[in-house]
Image (tube, rainbow, N blue to C red):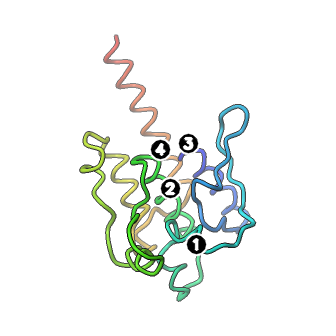
Amino acid sequence: MTRKIASQLSEFHSLDQLFGTVRPEVVMLLADGEPELKRSTSGDPNEEVDYLAPERALSVKKPDARSDLYSLGCTFYYLLTGRIPFPEGSVAERLLKHQVESPPDLNEICPGMPAELRDLCSQLLAKRRDHRPSSARAVAKALEQWLESSQSREELQTA
């Protein structure tokens, strides 16, 4: 699912558009089970706080494609763990945590998670946007490679 969302983000970015804040509420499942991003018309910042990139919360730098990648990372974290990165505290406290804290370690929440997924999620959640992946296309490609190698390992084990 995250790979397909990253591919859709890549399409937005190729048109010099930002999506805004990727979060579970804006991911719709189509009749065929495929995910599709739908822009929210709510405009309620409280709906975005748990997925908001640090630079967007501070409004000190113009958001760019890597801001979308941070919110994708928060959504990926949620999909992997069933919880948001910073579930506790007031809106202001959660915004601050996005600025300065690392979310709980994926190894502790989901022991045995593949290192590639854990590392990609950590990269997406980097506080500094220049430490995040370079593009949504790169994220989609990394997930595609992981899926292919995972399937190859399964085939070898069942052979």
For residue 101, what is the image quadrant?
bottom left
Number of the label disc, if any, that sits on residue 1: 3
Crowding around mark 1 (Cα neighbors within 10 Å: few <14, some 14 to 19, many 20+) is few
Q: Residue furthest top?
A: 159
**Residue displayed at 69% across by 60% down:** 12
Secondary structure at numbered mark 2 = helix
Crowding around mark 2 (Cα neighbors within 10 Å: few <14, some 14 to 19, many 20+) is many
Sooner in the amino-acid sequence: mark 3 or mark 1: 3
Sooner in the amino-acid sequence: mark 2 or mark 3: 3
In the rendered structure, the answer to whether residue 51 lies left or right of residue 81 reads right
Whether 148 is drawn above or below 10: the answer is above
The amino acid type of the residue labelled 1 equals Asn
Sooner in the amino-acid sequence: mark 1 or mark 2: 1
In percent of width and height, residue 26 lies at 65, 55
The residue that label 2 is drawn on is 75
From mark 4 to mark 3, how far is it between C-alphas?
10 Å
Sooner in the amino-acid sequence: mark 4 or mark 3: 3
**Residue displayed at 70% across by 72% down:** 43
Sooner in the amino-acid sequence: mark 4 or mark 2: 2
The C terminus lies in quadrant: top left
Number of the label disc, if any, that sits on residue 143: 4
Secondary structure at numbered mark 3 = loop
The residue that label 1 is drawn on is 46
The amino acid type of the residue labelled 3 equals Met
From mark 3 to mark 1, how far is it between C-alphas?
25 Å
In percent of width and height, residue 28 lies at 67, 47
- In the image, 19 versus 141, the foreground residue is 19
In percent of width and height, residue 36 lies at 68, 47
From mark 4 to mark 2, how far is it between C-alphas?
15 Å
Sooner in the amino-acid sequence: mark 4 or mark 1: 1
